[in-house]
């Protein structure tokens, strides 16, 4: 079963992260690299991407003429999507284990970020999930 793990934060969290000391940022990215490497070696990794900051986000809709209409930036938004992982695991419980590992990533001072990770199964016709 395929799952998407969504890492989100609020504006205060994003601003806090941008003020982390360089050594803590490097430690956090080393942790994420190790996690991706472990998931690759176990055959569970499909994809992962970090997203640009929320100040670059836009909502696009099609106008009556089909041309794009954009809206944003959304500084009033309470939460921002920071990145995602797509994994292929045997069970929902395994997806939860990986999400917990992500949430336990290191923050400044050695504590865990404890960032919330949303776990959602990816529904596809190919897998017969619909």
Image: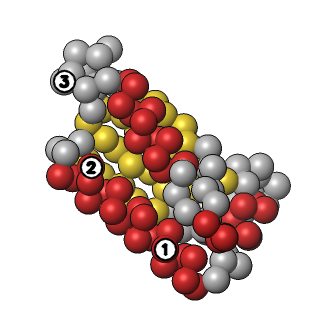
Q: Which residue appears at 48% of the width and 50% of the height? A: 102
Q: How far apart are marks 3 and 2 (CA)?
A: 23 Å
Q: Which residue is more in the foreground, 95 or 47?
A: 95
Res. 68 visible in picture: no
Of the numbered discs 3 and 1, the one sitting upstream in the chain is 1
Decide if residue 96 is on the left or right side of residue 10.
left
Q: Which residue appears at 27% of the width and 32% of the height? A: 89
Quadrant that contains the N terminus? top left
Residue denoted by label 3:
126
- Viewer-nearest of labels 3 and 2? 2
Res. 118 visible in picture: yes
Could you say which disc has been placed on residue 39 in the image?
Answer: 2
Using a 10 Å C-alpha cutoff, classify the residue at mark 3 as few (fewer than 14 neighbours), some (14 to 19) or many (20 or more): few
- Viewer-nearest of labels 3 and 1? 1
Residue denoted by label 1:
27
- Per the image, label 2 sits on a secondary structure element best described as helix
Q: Which residue appears at 39% of the width and 49% of the height? A: 85
Give x and y (percent) for residue 87: 31, 41
Q: Which residue is more in the foreground, 127 or 20?
A: 20
Q: How far apart are marks 1 and 2 (CA)?
A: 18 Å
Decide if residue 56 is on the left or right side of residue 15.
left
């Amino acid at each position: 079963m395929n799952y998407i793990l969504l890492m989100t934060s609020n504006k205060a969290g994003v601003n806090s992260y941008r003020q982390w000391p360089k050594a803590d940022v490097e430690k956090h990215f080393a942790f994420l690299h190790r996690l991706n490497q472990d998931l690759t070696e176990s055959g569970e990794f499909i994809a992962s991407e970090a997203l640009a900051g929320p100040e670059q986000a836009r909502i696009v809709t099609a106008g009556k003429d089909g041309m794009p209409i954009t809206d944003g930036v959304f500084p009033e938004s309470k939460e921002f999507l920071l990145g995602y992982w797509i994994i292929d695991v045997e069970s929902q419980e395994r997806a939860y284990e990986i999400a917990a590992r992500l949430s336990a990533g290191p923050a400044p001072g050695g504590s865990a970020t404890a960032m919330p990770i949303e776990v959602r199964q990816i529904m596809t016709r190919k897998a017969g999930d619909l």
